[in-house]
Amino acid sequence: MSQITWITPITDRTSADVAARVPKAFIHAEDLRRVEGNIEYLSNYLNSRRYNISVFPAKLWLRENIPTTTDIRRICDRIEAITEAYYRPEHYVDISNLFSRRLAASDMNDVERNLLGIKAMLEMGIHFNTHFVLSNRTHGSMRSYTHNQLRKN
């Protein structure tokens, strides 16, 4: 199995790019390969640090492929799984409903910025080991907190 590498996201698509028909403003197989590869990279990295994230191989995107609603939902769900197991960066944009509408350049920016935000936190060495922090607590004393609250505190 080959090592998955991080590929720098594109996060600066604009409506002017769309109007000028600049290639980066449109979703290509290369963009989807980069996004899915970066998701796999983050999942593998976090799993190597004892986070429990299901890792599914990225879809082999070919030039002629057109992303379906199912494809977009799968990508969004995989990013959500990373943030649920790890942490949601401060400027994270909710992408949970992207599959229900036509994708815009700004939507792809949001997807890639979210991934970039997660990677930035990892590079700063920020790890949230909930199990270690909670090992001295009882279930009853933690009952009133949600999982996200426990991870943040």
Image (tube, rainbow, N blue to C red):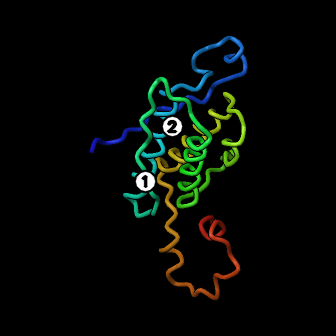
What kind of element bears circle 1? loop
Q: Up-down: is 85 above or below 72?
A: below
Asked if disc 1 and disc 2 are in contact, CB closer than 8 Å, the reply is: no
Mark 2 secondary-structure assignment: helix
Please provide percent x and percent y for residue 102.
70, 33
User: Left or right: where does residue 40 sit relative to residue 20?
Assistant: left
Q: Position of residue 2 (x, y in %)?
A: 28, 41
How far apart are the alpha carbons under marks 1 and 2?
Answer: 14 Å
Front residue of 94/33: it is 33
Name the quarter where the N terminus is drawn.
top left
**Residue bearing the label numbered 2:** 35
**Residue 84 versus residue 132: which sits nearer the camera?**
84
Q: Label 2: few (<14), some or many (≥20) within 10 Å? A: many
Residue at 68% x, 45% y: name it: 93
- Report which residue position mark 1 lands on: 55
x 57%, y 87%: residue? 138
Task: Please give the count of numbered marks on the rendered protein.
Answer: 2
**3 or 33, nearer to the observer:** 33
Q: Is residue 76 left or right of residue 145?
A: left
Circle 1: residue type: Val
Residue type of the residue flagged with mark 2:
Val
